[in-house]
Amino acid sequence: MTKNQQLLAKMGGGSLALLLSLSLGQQASATTLVSNLPPTTLETNGGAVKFDQWVSSSFTTGSGIYGYTLDSVTLRFREVTADNNLSVSLYTDNFGGIGGLITSFTKPSSITTTNDNNTFTLTTPQTLASGTTYWLVAGISTSGSGEYSWRITDFPAQTGLPGWSIGDSSFFSNNQGLTWTPFPGSVIFQFSVDGTVNTSPPPPTNIPEPGSIVALLGLAGLGLASRLKKLSTRA
């Protein structure tokens, strides 16, 4: 191997790996963070989701040092009458009640007409703080005849990562989320929360785009070529 080849192996490969690791990072596989979906629990009833009845249920995150990343939620759900204005959203907690809107999920292309698991995804994954309560809110944003049913269980059983839990009290709103009223008794909606455990602080918001990465690699290559040329001249 020539001196130039040795230098290329030491500098080029290392620079490439460093640039890729800094810009792309490592992505963990999504997992179920908490769930009370069957067969963990049995459904006993359903809560109507309509324009004049929004419903909400809470979950609380575990104690992960760097928090978590939310990718999707799966609701035990069925379509009664289809409506394009169905929304499932994530809200903050406000002293045990529903707070402000954080983000909204993308609904599946079709929702089952029988009770089944339907997954709602996030276009941009959402960071969740550790030891924090959040609320899932389902409703229809525009007046119409659309209706869905979010299934309810009487069983408090659930599975998930340490510290995660699903709340055993839920709320409904008859005015599109302006005010909320607790359901009488224990009403537990069936759902799962899916995502990843963050093993390092969340990445900065100014992560280079793929085009920028290529540009960085190009600049690194030019610098390397210049150095090789100087070494060849000296030789």
Image: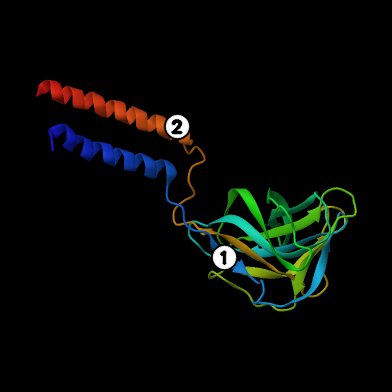
Left of 7 or right of it: where is 86? right
Residue linked to disc 2: 212
Inspect the image, locate mark 2, and give the three-letter code of the amino acid beneath it: Ser
First reached walking from the N terminus: tag 1 or tag 2: 1
As rendered, which of 189 and 179 lies closer to the eye? 189
Q: Label 1 vs label 2: CA separation?
A: 34 Å
Residue 176: give its label. none
Whether 83 is drawn above or below 167: the answer is above
Circle 1 packing at 10 Å, graded few (<14), some (14-19), many (20+), is: some
Task: Give the amino acid at mark 1.
Answer: Thr
Q: Residue at x 60, y 67 (%)?
A: 34
In x, y percent, where is residue 72? 62, 57
Image coordinates of residue 133 in percent, x first then y, are 64, 61
| Residue at figure coordinates x 27%, y 36% from the top left | 12
87 relative to 200 in the view: left or right? right
Q: Secondary structure at mark 1?
A: strand
Which image quarter is the N terminus in? top left
Q: Which residue is mark 1?
A: 32
Say which residue appears at 71% left-offset and 59% top-offset.
136
